[in-house]
Image (cartoon, rainbow, N blue to C red):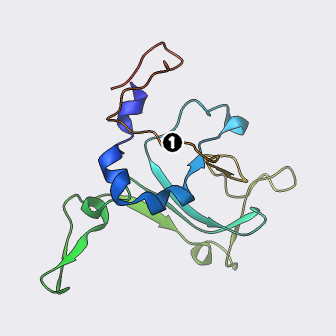
Amino acid sequence: MGGSCLPYNSATHEKQTWLAQHFHLWRSEKRKRTRVMPHIKTYTRLNKNCSAAQFLLLTSANLSKAAWGMLQKQNSQLFIRSYEAGILILPKFLSDSDEFQLTSASNPSGLSLPYDVPLTPYPDGAVPWFMNTIKKRTDIFGRTYP
């Protein structure tokens, strides 16, 4: 029932279709975890050749107003509905660099991301996973959702 842990529904998507241009396929072949997407959220900024990261944020926070908050009362008050935990890792606190070098054959001690890089953008016409829609195809366990 892992698909139910992705709290993204079609009504939310209709309000923010611009977000789809930033979607990428989950791939973790190097760790043999492509079929096992974690629930934790990982945000990072990679350099152009995907060899280094400028920061890494590991958090439980979704991309939602509930998690990140929204300004109210004429922008004088930040209202957060759902407090989340996370860790922001910046290279300047661990080294004399502005970037973390990623792990590679020549750099086994670099930063190890839970997914493969370079990232694979959603193909044209791909539809995001919505937890509230009935799927025609079964998953690897023969189940459909919701």
The amino acid pointed to by label 1 is Val
3 in relation to 84, above or below: above
Drawn side of residue 95 relative to residue 38, left or right: right
Residue extending farthest right: 106
3 in relation to 99, above or below: above
129 in relation to 24, above or below: above
Observer-nearest residue: 21 or 38? 21
Q: Quadrant of residue 126?
A: top right
Q: Secondary structure at mark 1?
A: loop
Q: Quadrant of the N terminus?
A: top left
Is residue 9 visible to the viewer in this orientation of the structure? no
Q: Quadrant of the C terminus?
A: top left
Residue depicted at x 75% and y 55%: 109
Tag 1 residue:
127
How many numbered dots are placed on residues in this image? 1
* Image position, residue 47 (x, y; %): 71, 69
Residue depicted at x 47% and y 62%: 18
Residue depicted at x 67% and y 31%: 32
* Image position, residue 114 (x, y; %): 60, 46
Drawn side of residue 55 relative to residue 4, left or right: right
Is residue 89 visible to the viewer in this orientation of the structure? yes
Residue extending farthest front: 125
* Image position, residue 28 (x, y; %): 65, 39
Residue depicted at x 41% and y 31%: 3
Mark 1 nearby-residue class (10 Å; few <14, some 14–19, many ≥20): few
Residue extending farthest left: 73
Observer-nearest residue: 4 or 109? 4
* Image position, residue 130 (x, y; %): 39, 39
99 in relation to 143, above or below: below
Q: Quadrant of residue 55?
A: bottom right
Observer-nearest residue: 121 or 18? 18
